[in-house]
Image: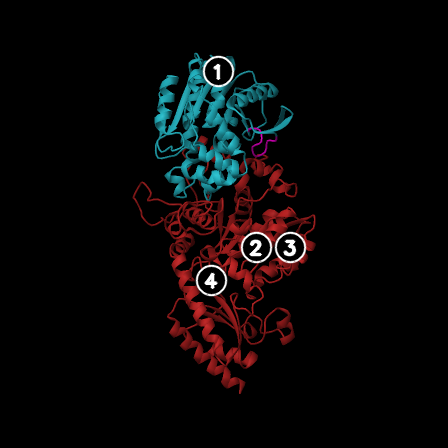
Amino acid sequence: MSNSSFYKPSTIALHTGYSPEPQHGSRAVPIYQTTSFAFDDVSDAQSLFNVERGGHIYSRISNPTVAVLEQRLAALEGGTGAICTASGMSALYSTFTTLCSAGDHIVSSAQIYGSTATLLRHTLPRFNINTDFVPINNPEALRAAIKPNTKLVFCESISNPGMEVSNLPEIAKIANEMGVPVVVDATFATPALCRPIEHGANIVVHSVTKWIGGHGAAIGGAIIDGGNFDWGNGRFPEMTEPFAPYHGMRFWEEFGPNCFVMKVRSEAMRDLGPAMAPQNAFLILQGVETLSLRMKKHVENTKALRDWLLEQEAVTWVNHPELDTNDSCEVAKTLFPDGAGSMLCFGVAGGRAGGAAFINSVGLASHLANVGDSRTLVLHPGSTTHSRLTKEALEASGISEDLIRVSVGLEDIKDITSDFAKGLKAAVRVSE
Amino acid sequence: MKLRVNNAEVFIATGGKTFNPELPTVVFLHGSGLDHRSWALQTRWFAYHGYSVLAPDLPGHSLSSGAACESIEQSAEWLEQLLDEAGVKSAHIVGHSQGFLTALEFSKNNPGRVLSLTAIGTAAAIPVNQALIDTAKDSSAKAAHMMVNWGFGPSAHNGRSAVPGMQPIAIGRAIMSRNPLAADLQACADYKTGNDAISALGNIPACCILADKDKMTPIKAGLKLAENMGVNPMIIKGYGHMLPIEAPRKTLNALRNFISSVQIQVAA
C-alpha cells in the first residue's frame, strides 16, 4: 500500500492508471503516438485552456500513454502526482528551475552523479542559481548551509558512485524545520527498495532509463510530488503569487498537495519542452510491470557478487552500502531492508592499468556509460570518463585509479563471477 | 479571496476570477475534512461562464483559520455571516456530503436567499461510526486513511485520474490528514433533523447528484433524500462518494445543466 493506492506495489506496477479502454479493449497500455488532441468544439478548447477540466492538449505538455506511467510511478512512490520527462537530467533541471529563480540557492550533497554536479556547479550559476555542497549526513553542516534564499536540499538516496546512503529522515527533519523541501534522486533505489516520501522527502526524481525501465531501451525521467510540503510558508512566491501565464493562478491555493507537479506541467513542460515520447513511456511501462521481481534478482545477484569479490585476492577493496566498511551502512540497513540496490564498486590489483586490463578482459559484462540495465555493466572511470585526471585529481573526486563500477545484472551469478574471474586474472598479470 | 467571519480569516476560492456579487453567485460547500480544492474542476467553469463563485474552506480547514464548527447548525450560521460579508443576497448553493447538510440547514433558515439547492454524494442524515470518530480524534491521518479507502470508487482505486499524472487518493489523503476531521464527523453524526429541514424548503429548486458506488453515503440513502426532496436523482455510474474529484466533468455537466436552467427562470 502507498499513499496513493491500497494495492500492493507489484499490483500497482501492473494495473495503476489504466483499465482496458472502451473502444477496443486493449489490455496493454496503448501508445498514443500523436502530437495533439482534437477539441470537441470551441467551448471544449476554452475549458481545457482555462484549466476548467483536465485533459490532453498537446503531447509536449501531457499525453495519455505518458500519463499512465506518471500515475503508476506516483502510486509506487506514494506521491500525489508525477510528471515524466525526456531524461533524468531534464527531470532534475525542471525541478530545480521550477523552485529556483535567479538569486536563489541550493544545498546539495557533495556525493552526487557527475552530470548533476556539473548542472549545479557550472550551468545553473550562469543563471545566478548557486549551490553549496555539504556532507549530507552531517546534520550541523546541513543546517549551517541553509540560507534564507535556499529553495531546496538535494541528495541521492544512494549516491553515484560513492554508494553513500542519505539519511533521509534526518535530512528531511532539518530541511523541513527550516522551511525547505528535500529533493531526492532515487534512481539507484527505485520504489521497489526505498520510497523516500515515506521517510520525509518532498520530491522524488528518477532517471527511469535505469532500473525502472530496466532494459536499456529508452531514456526517460520522472518527478514525483510527495504532497507533503507547505509551499505557503512564505519562502516560495513561485507557488503562492499570481502566475501571469495562467490568468494569475496561485498554484498553492488552487492545487495544494499537488501544486508542485502542476507548476512543473504548466511552466517547465510548456516553456522548456522536455517531454517524454509516448513510445518511450510504453517501453518503460514494460519495465515497470516487472520492477519488483527484477529488483529482487538484482539484489540477490549483487549480494552474491559482492561476497565473491570480497574473497578474491586480486580485489583490494569492495564498496556497497550494506558493508560495514561503508560509512552509511547503518542507515542503509534501516532504509533499505530489502537490499541497498545493485550497484557496487571495487578496487582491482594493478591500479589504473589493472582496471583497464579488467575491462578489456571481461566478455559477458558490457563496458559502457549506463547503469540499471538487465545486463551486467562495468566501467573503469580511471581509463574512460576520468582518464585525463591525475591520480591526485581522481582522488579529489572520490574516485581511485583502481575503481571498477559495476551495475549488477540479471544473468546467472555463476556466469557473472566466471566472467569477472577472467578480468581479475588479467589485472593480476598487469600488476606483476 | 479572504474575508473575516467571527474574527477569523476565511479563504474562499473564486474560480480564478475576481468575485463580483452583482453576478449570479454559486456557493460550493466541501465535505468532511476536505477543502475548496474538491471543486477545482467545477468552480472555474462557472466563474468563466457568467457566474460568481464562492468555494470557502470551512473554519479551521486548509487555508481558513479559526476553530472548526462544532455542529451543522453552527456551520449554517457561519455561512449566513459569510454571505453577508461577501455582499451576497441570494445564491445557488451546492453541497457535497457534509457540505450539503450545511446547505440544507442554511436553506431551511434562509429560504429567500437560496436560488437553488444541489446535493452531491450525500443523504439527509450521515450517521458516522463512532470508531471512525474516535480514530479521527486520535489522528486525522489515520481517519483519512479509512475515509479515502471507502470514499473513492473503483476508478480512483485503480489510479485513474481526470487530470493527467495525478493521484486523487493521495491528494484527498493529504488534504484530509491536515484538517479537523473529528469535528466534521461528529457534526455529521449529531445532525438528525435533515428531513425536517427538507420539509421546510418550500419551492426552492433542487437537484440531487448521486454515485452508484458510494460507500460513505450509500445510494439507498441518497435515493431516499431525492424522494424526500421531490426530485429525480441524477446517478453517475461507476464512481464513489468523492464525485466532484473522481468524476469532475460528469459532476460539472449535471451541475451546469441544473443551475443554468434555474438561472434562466430566475432571470425571467
Q: Is residue A42 above or below residue A394?
A: above
In this figure, which residue is indicated by the disc labeled 4? A339
Disc number for residue A58: none
Location of mark 3 (residue): A107
Q: Amino acid at mark 4?
A: Gly
Residue at (40, 57) in percent of width and height = A292
What whole-number distance in Å separates the C-alpha atoms at marks 3 and 1?
57 Å
Mark 4 Cα shell of 10 Å, populated few (<14), some (14-19), many (≥20): many
Q: Is the same chain shared between marks 2 and 1? A: no
Which residue position holds label 1? B108
Using the rendered image, report if marks 3 and 1 lie on a common chain.
no
Using the rendered image, report if marks 3 and 2 lie on a common chain: yes
First of labels 2, 4 by sequence position: 2
Residue identified by numbered label 2: A168
Chain letter of the residue carrying label 2: A
The amino acid at mark 3 is Val
Query: Which portion, as a residue range, is magenta?
Result: B58-65
> Disc 3 or disc 2, which is closer to the eye?
2
Specify the colour of chain A.
red
Chain of the residue under the numbered disc 1 shown in the image: B
| Quarter in which the N terminus of chain B is drawn | top right
**Image coordinates for residue A57, horizontal then vertical, percent:** 46, 41
**Secondary structure type for disc 1:** helix
Of tags 4 and 3, the one toward the viewer is 4
- Answer whether labels 3 and 1 touch (C-beta < 8 Å): no
Q: Nearer the viewer, residue A303 or B127?
A: B127
At x 53%, y 61%, the residue is A332
Nearer to us: label 3 or label 1 = 1
* Residue A201 lies within the magenta run: no
Distance from Cα at disc 1 to Cα at disc 4? 61 Å
